[in-house]
Amino acid sequence: MRSLIFAANWKMHVGPPEAREYLRAFFAAGEIPHERGVWFFPPAVSLETVAQGIAGHRNVHAGAQDIYWEAKGAFTGATSGPLAKQAGARLTLIGHSERRHVFGETDEQTGKKVTAALAADLQPVLCVGETLAQREAGDTMTVVTRQLEAALGERDGRARVAIAYEPVWAIGTGRNATPQDAAEVHRAIRRWLKGHPTTATPFVILYGGSVNLKNAAELLAEPELDGVLVGGASLDPRGWAQLVRTAVA
Ligand code: PEP
């Protein structure tokens, strides 16, 4: 059976007591099938609680939703890679569309964050994706390639990275990409990664954007998808436990 990753982005939800309760309900659904990996991205305040709550579950990991590129210092409100690592993170999202479009994060900043993540021994999960206007203008691959190039093009060595292809128009909108549309972009990302001397195999390429219990099986039946990154539908522990067990043809 093919290995699949199910990544949960809790965004600005689920504080520490709620995270404890969430994990209790999630694990009450039973052992996770061993060819499935589960990654939780809680808000920074809940990272340590989640890391403690998943301890002993081999295929479950915790990650930060974002890091700052400096390792320490006078940067009020920011979380560095080493601090996220201390709290138990193994991974970090970088360049999530809400960071880019709500907080104004630039391509150059995502590059600095990838470097900082690797220096802190965190696996970066780089999020890329086009807006609706860019898709309609036929610029999807130009945008995604620019984002890949900016974040990964200049790195030293061969970095183990995961990519989340998340079209901006599909995030939190209830409108998902079709499996065929997602696959086309995934293939192009895979070609870029293979041809690029700064990235190491194997690659994990996730699709994100309004994935839920209704559409997960159809999306995951597309072999180009190595898994999914899910926001809204990951907030209910029982629904998420079901999603992680989605039967894939
Ligand atoms: C996300 O937060 O990365 C995401 C894909 O959100 P949603 O599943 O709610 O569209």
Image: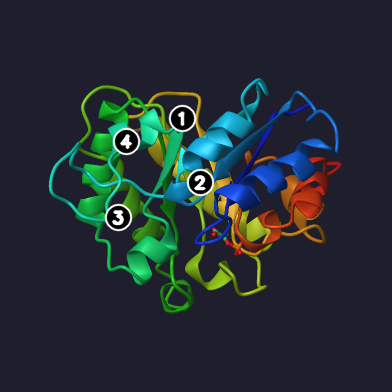
Say if 111 sits above or below 140 in the image.
Answer: above
Q: Along the horizontal axis of the image, is 152 left or right of 164?
A: left
- Amino acid carrying label 4: it is Leu
Estimate the spatial distance between the alpha carbons at disc 2 and disc 1, rounded to whole Å.
Answer: 14 Å
Q: Along the horizontal axis of the image, is 74 left or right of 68?
A: left
Instruction: Compare marks 3 and 2 and give the one earlier in the sequence.
Output: 2
- Amino acid carrying label 2: it is Ser
Say if 18 sits above or below 73 in the image.
Answer: below
Q: Nearer the viewer, residue 49 or 125?
A: 49
Q: Nearer the viewer, residue 172 or 22?
A: 22
Instruction: Kindly tell me whether mark 1's CB lies below 8 Å from ligand 1.
Output: no
Identify the residue under disc 2: 46
- Amino acid carrying label 3: it is Arg
Figure quadrant of residue 103: bottom left
- Amino acid carrying label 1: it is Arg
Q: Mark 2 and mark 3 in contact (Cβ < 8 Å)?
A: no
Q: Mark 3 and mark 1 in contact (Cβ < 8 Å)?
A: no
Say if 182 sits above or below 71 in the image.
Answer: below
Identify the residue under disc 1: 90
Instruction: Compare marks 2 and 1 and give the one earlier in the sequence.
Output: 2
Instruction: Kindly tell me whether mark 2's CB lies below 8 Å from ligand 1.
Output: no
Identify the residue under disc 4: 83
Foreground: disc 1 or disc 3: 1
Estimate the spatial distance between the alpha carbons at disc 3 and disc 2, rounded to whole Å.
Answer: 33 Å
Estimate the spatial distance between the alpha carbons at disc 4 and disc 2, rounded to whole Å.
Answer: 13 Å
Identify the residue under disc 3: 146
Residue 197 seen in this snapshot: no
Instruction: Compare marks 1 and 3 and give the one earlier in the sequence.
Output: 1
